[in-house]
Image (cartoon, rainbow, N blue to C red):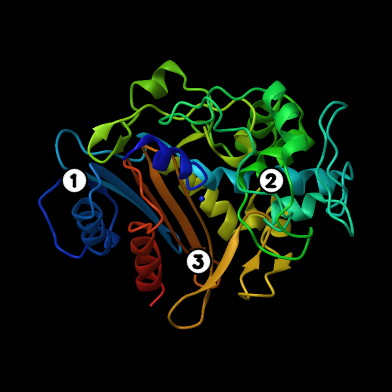
Amino acid sequence: MDRRRLLGTAAAAAGAALIPGRAVAAGDGLAARVRPYLDRALAAGAPSAVFGVIRGARRHVAGAGQDGPAPDGRTVFQLGSIGKTLTATALARAVGAGTVRLDTPLRLPPGFTVPRGTTRRITLRDLATHSSGLPSLPANLLDGADPYNPYAHYTLEDLAAGLPRTALHNEPGSTYAYSNLGFGLLGQALAFDGVDAMLRRRVAAPLGLRDTTTTLRPDMASRKAVGHMEGEAVPDWRDRVLSGAGTSIYSTADDMLRYLDAQLRPERSPLRDAIELTQRIHFTDPATGLRLGLGWHFGTLSDGRTVTWHNGGTYGFSTCAAFDRENGTAVMMMVNTYSDTTRPFDGLVFALLDELGS
């Protein structure tokens, strides 16, 4: 992939044939349902894959790899944009605490010029529903960027310099347009220059997500999968400024099943009110009918049931999480390869979720 095309895809990271792969699995009858999807993930080009599923009171995690040991529930992957739902949960907690409202205008410290529309200002709700009108990336993000690690060089000073160059594509609150910049600014609005610590304290720690963090502990590094693009190993993404967009966060299938269990059963969670707020419809795109919660997207399964979902990716990893509260089912997928805009792995998640609910 050439450098220009590579940098142009920085916002993304948001086969049926069976091939051999060594797998490790734990669980009950769910194993027979999950195994074909692992095979399909390998057939679609994943060096390794892990799926975690919830069906009622049952849990199952299984991994498979082309070569070497198969990943398991403790294998560390970069999570990508699923991390946006953690930032949205932090926003919902702040709303519950009364420190902000969803219609609070976006405010940043002096020196950071906030773009605004002609009719009104950008609100925190706009940021959390991708309806702010902001572009997907800062105007100056790719100036001098490492094509394989496009956020690593970007500083708060760069953000301050880029915001005055940033024009809104749409009026706030009018149109869905996916924006890493928007969620990055949401994180900074909630905890300026302290986003990562805020997400650990306000979301990950209360939910017991010990391995969901932007900072690799030594024990995490020893069990981290190596990211790949087009068959070659690539570096993990680093981001010190826009990490509220999920650009540099890590997690595991075990952690994500805990997270999805809280989404399915908020009443058992210490973050009940915040989780419920994120799952309400807060914006519907007038052009497409796409419905948005805070961070979460809503879709429809084959039998009309509602699926709540988010995917993620960096240049070395692809992930997707989806759940159906009505049937108490959830699926998490992690693979250690980049997935382009066709997102071939996401369809496996929705198909498996559909099957589990039948």
Q: Residue furthest left?
A: 20
Number of marks in the rendered image: 3
* Mark 3, other Cα within 10 Å: few <14 / some 14–19 / many ≥20: some
Spatial separation of the CA atoms under disc 2 and disc 3 = 31 Å
Q: Is residue 184 above or below residue 156?
A: below
Q: Secondary structure at mark 3?
A: loop
Answer left or right for 338 relative to 294: left
Q: Is residue 207 above or below residue 117?
A: above
Most foreground residue, 115 or 214: 115
Answer left or right for 21 relative to 52: left
Residue 182 has which mark? 2
Most foreground residue, 84 or 179: 179
The residue under label 3 is 328
Q: Secondary structure at mark 1?
A: strand
Which of the 4 image quadrants contains residue 313? top left
Identity, as a three-letter code, of the amino acid under mark 1: Ala
State which quarter of the image contains the C terminus.
bottom left
Most foreground residue, 324 or 155: 155
